[in-house]
Image (cartoon, rainbow, N blue to C red):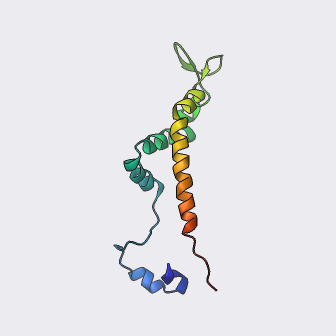
Amino acid sequence: MESFFAGDFESLMTKNKSTNDLSQVNILTCIQKWSKDKGSVEILYDLFCDLVHPNIGSSMLVMQTWDDGIGFGGKGKKFGHDILVKTIAGIILLFNKIKDYLKAMFLLQIHDTD
């Protein structure tokens, strides 16, 4: 960080990548590492990815369930409601953990000393 703010870009390009400096991590790497500590993270991530991307998962939220099947329309039980009921506890636990991470990140802010 110091090299960047000092304009020493040559130092950044030749810097040893094996140091313990913080580095950017993509979301999949983050999820995989986090799921080693909390297995439900990857399960919830995969489920909700299916629900928000344009595939059958996004249709599931508006589908109905009956004793003999699943479909659209009618007066069946809302499938999206079932998904919420079955995942809400895990989601709350993850949001609480994310809240803790965000609080920790706030402490890492770099303040200008000028």
Q: Please tell me which residue is depicted at 53% across the width and 13% down the height of the picture.
A: 67
Point 37% across, 49% down: residue: 36
Residue at the extreme top: 68
Residue 35 image position (x, y, % from top left): 40, 48
Percent coordinates x, y for residue 13 in the rendering:
42, 80
Vertical placement of 59 versus 4: above or below? above
Residue in front for this viewpoint, 28 or 113: 113
Q: Position of residue 50 (x, y in %)?
A: 51, 39
Number of numbered labels in the structure image: 0
**Position of 79 relative to 44 (above/below):** above
Q: Nearer the viewer, residue 87 or 13?
A: 87
The image quadrant of residue 107 is bottom right
Q: Nearer the viewer, residue 14 or 56?
A: 14
Where the C terminus falls, by quadrant? bottom right
Kindly tell me whether residue 54 is visible in this rendering: no
Residue 43 at x, y = what percent? 44, 40
Is residue 62 toward the left or the right of residue 44 in the image? right
* Residue under the image location 52 percent in, 31 percent down: 86
Question: In the image, is 29 to the left or to the right of 87?
Answer: left
Q: Is residue 1 among what the camera can see?
A: yes
Tell me the residue at 52%/57% (across/down): 101
